[in-house]
Image (spheres, rainbow, N blue to C red):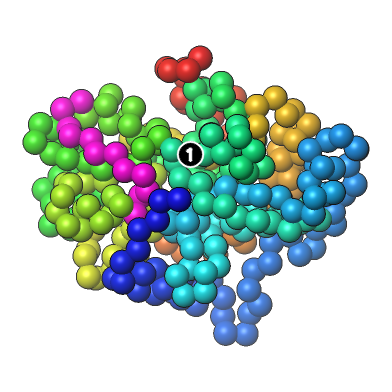
């Protein structure tokens, strides 16, 4: 599994996690325990839910290097973040233990297809092409595509990513197509993990990074005053995240849709959002409750696999 750590990045991640924990919870507060009040249901034999209950665990593919959604704490070894806590909530409704497995952008679909994981919660945008290979739950988060550059950069938006400029994004992400379409003259560099994009930007090997705004915000927090950066330009895209599941499992899909709706209604989603995301972004983002799965698919019509 691809993983690259250096002491400076590891130190920054420890500081980031400490900052998140301190800001989200006061000294006397209990840490967030998603699903603590959820009662596990019994499911009909033969369903994926019943099989998972019999196994006693659900394997969830998450990012290990994309705060605040999924991050392996280099100090404790724990996996933490928004997607992780949502995974814990889903596991609680099944009454099973969550087991987290690193899933980078390029192996998420293969992991579902070969049974390496049961579900994907890995900042995965719902697209029609992906939906031809796997299935998705309803949206559980709405991100926006943005561009990240060093503080002193003259790049002000997508129009400045012309000939002679280089921009990094992750292999297998939606931004390969977005950048090809909106910045056709830019030199697009693809890497396995977004942490590699941050390393390339810090080292001056690329001029910009493009991906979801919240992932880029995590990079800004990681780098801190040591390497100040900024988001520039207007949003490039709207990116609805969905839970990825194996193709054709409609009962499991309905269970996940219902569980995500429960998290909206019982306040768990908002608690998770406030802890991991809300304190780091300005304004109120679009709420996933306002989007259906079809709304999400309409944003990314078929272009490759269907």
Residue sitting farthest toward the top: 306
Q: Look at 78% across and 31% down and name the residue there.
A: 251
Q: Which residues are magenta?
A: 184-195
Observer-nearest residue: 286 or 64? Answer: 64
**Which residue, given by chain and number where applicable, does mark 1 sit on?**
107
Q: Quadrant of residue 236?
A: top left
Q: Position of residue 2 (x, y in %)?
A: 41, 51
Q: Look at 28% across and 31% down and name the residue there.
A: 179
> Where is 48 relative to 96, above or below?
above
Any part of residue 240 in sight: no
Any part of residue 62 in sight: yes
> Where is 195 relative to 169, above or below?
below
Q: Look at 79% across and 54% down and name the residue there.
A: 56
Q: Is residue 169 left or right of residue 100?
A: left
Q: Quadrant of residue 254?
A: top right
Q: Position of residue 119 (x, y in %)?
A: 64, 42
Observer-nearest residue: 216 or 287? Answer: 216
Q: Quadrant of residue 177?
A: top left
Q: Is residue 97 left or right of residue 246?
A: right
Q: Is residue 246 left or right of residue 40?
A: left
Q: Residues within 10 Å of mark 1 (few under 14, many from 20)?
A: some
> Where is 258 relative to 102, above or below?
above
Q: Is residue 291 magenta?
A: no
Q: Look at 22% across and 70% down and name the residue there.
A: 226
Residue sitting farthest toward the left: 164
Q: Position of residue 281 (x, y in %)?
A: 41, 57
């Amino acid at each position: 599994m691809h993983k690259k750590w250096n002491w400076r990045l590891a130190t920054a991640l420890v500081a980031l996690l400490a900052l998140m924990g301190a800001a989200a919870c006061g000294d006397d507060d209990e840490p967030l325990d998603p699903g603590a009040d959820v009662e596990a249901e019994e499911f009909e034999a033969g369903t994926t839910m019943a099989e998972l209950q019999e196994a006693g665990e659900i394997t969830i593919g998450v990012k290990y290097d994309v705060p605040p959604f999924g991050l392996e704490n280099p100090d404790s070894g724990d996996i933490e973040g928004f997607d992780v806590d949502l995974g814990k909530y889903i596991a609680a409704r099944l009454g099973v233990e969550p087991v987290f497995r690193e899933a980078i952008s390029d192996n998420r679909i293969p992991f579902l297809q070969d049974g390496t994981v049961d579900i994907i919660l890995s900042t995965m945008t719902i697209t029609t092409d992906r939906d031809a290979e796997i299935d998705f739950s309803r949206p559980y988060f709405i991100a926006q595509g943005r561009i990240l550059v060093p503080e002193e950069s003259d790049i002000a938006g997508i129009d400045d990513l012309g000939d002679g400029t280089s921009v990094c994004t992750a292999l297998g992400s939606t931004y390969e197509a977005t950048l090809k379409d909106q910045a056709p003259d830019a030199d697009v560099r693809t890497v396995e993990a977004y942490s590699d994009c941050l390393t390339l930007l810090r080292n001056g090997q690329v001029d910009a990074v493009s991906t979801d705004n919240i992932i880029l915000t995590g990079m800004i927090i990681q780098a801190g005053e040591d390497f100040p950066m900024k988001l520039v330009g207007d949003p490039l895209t709207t990116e609805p995240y969905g839970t990825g599941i194996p193709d054709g499992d409609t009962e499991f899909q309905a269970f996940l849709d219902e569980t995500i709706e429960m998290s909206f209604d019982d306040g768990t989603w908002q608690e998770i959002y406030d802890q991991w995301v809300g304190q780091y972004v300005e304004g109120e983002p679009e709420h996933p409750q306002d989007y259906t799965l079809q709304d999400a698919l309409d944003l990314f019509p078929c272009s490759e696999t269907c």
